[in-house]
Amino acid sequence: MSVERLNAVSRLWKWLQWLTHPVVVFVLLQLIWLAITLIWVIWFVGSGYELEQLANSVTRTYLDNQVALTVLIVGCILLGMLLFGTVLLFIMNQRQRSMINQQKIFLSSVTHELRSPLASLQLIIETLGCRQLNPETLHKLHQMGMQDVTRLTRLVHQILLSSRLDRGILPGSDAVVRVDLKELFPEVVGQLAWCDESIGERTRILCDPDVIVYQPPDLLKLVFSNILENAVKYSPKGSGIHIHARNLGDRIQVGIKDEGVGLSPRERRKIFNIFYRAEVTRKMAIPGTGMGLFIVKSLLDTLGGKISVESLGRNKGSIFEIGIPCQPKGARRSKVS
């Protein structure tokens, strides 16, 4: 088969795929539906005399203008209800398809996330059982094993927490204490050394003199660790990560900027949905489950905070803006120094 014929077949196949897309089919059906409705209305208005004669011959009564108008209005209302029902069913079907696709992507991602550390742990155990190793090698294997265990523990914790938050079950921690973000940020950064040993060197922290909040510290650590973990995973090796905290009186505004893959406007609208992952991250085989930012958004809602994201486009990085109230939301404050 010639190249020209292959190109023609390829174009035809693309057109067929486009014509059979659910959105295109739906739009065509609605246009046909509206055309039939318009033809029916024109026919009804233009056939008033014939309908009157038919009704007169059958029932020996005359249709006045008010009855005819009532029949027309009722018919249009019924057609409009059918149209609305069709649109509603289409929207629900699209949402269900989207959720099923996201769940499939989640299962694939979780399988990969579990397989990698388990394979590494199996190799470490086999190595320890097969040969006598010097102390330096043992120490290195111990560090690798601890990193894998930390990764698995974090993954299991995220799955359990996401499941609870998705069902509306909030975390039980209510230990509201005095938290200095200037001290919290270095601690969170240090805990992420398992995913990048150089994260301490590449992270720049700038804080106003008084960035104090009265909130559960464990929940704050979860919020910032998930955002910083994404900044590490979706940014080039060694690129900068910037944290800036400002005191705005009744709340603390935290900005976390990375130099990663960036986000499109469509992705910014969906990025906080559970299981959602941008298509470019899947193509680049970047590990992830799509639960981190869902956890962040849910926890901030619990704390009375807000989060938004900005990006100049693909490969231009992202900026997450987090607003945290200085006082707890509906909780008693207990100052602990």
Image (tube, grey):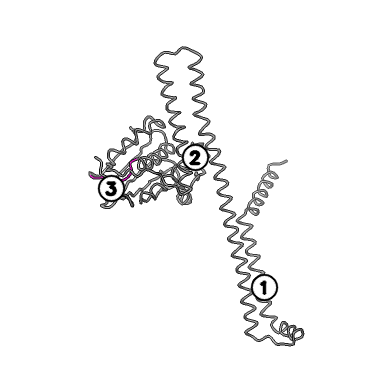
Q: Position of residue 321 (x, y in %)?
A: 36, 48
- Sooner in the amino-acid sequence: mark 2 or mark 1: 1
Q: Which residue is mark 1?
A: 39
Judging by the rendered image, the residue that carries numbered circle 2 is 289
Whether 308 is among the magenta residues is: no
- In magenta, the rendered stretch is 210-217
- Residue displayed at 41% across by 24% down: 143
Q: Gap in Å between the C-alphas at discs 2 and 3? A: 35 Å
- Above or below, 37 relative to 134: below
Position of 159 compared to 255: left or right? right
Secondary structure at numbered mark 2: loop
Does residue 330 lie above or below 147 as drawn? below
Residue at left offset 62%, top offset 75%: 74
Which of the 4 image quadrants contains residue 48? bottom right
Q: Earlier in the sequence, mark 3 or mark 1?
A: 1
Q: Residue furthest top?
A: 132
Question: Hey, what amino acid is under mark 1?
Answer: Ile
Separation of disc 3 and disc 1 at Cα?
Answer: 68 Å
Q: Secondary structure at mark 3?
A: loop
Name the amino acid type tagged 2.
Answer: Thr
Residue 333 has which mark? 3
Nearer-the-camera pick, 249 or 315: 249
Front position in the image: 214 or 56: 214
**Closer to the camera: disc 2 or disc 3?**
3
Residue at 42 percent of width and 22 percent of height: 142
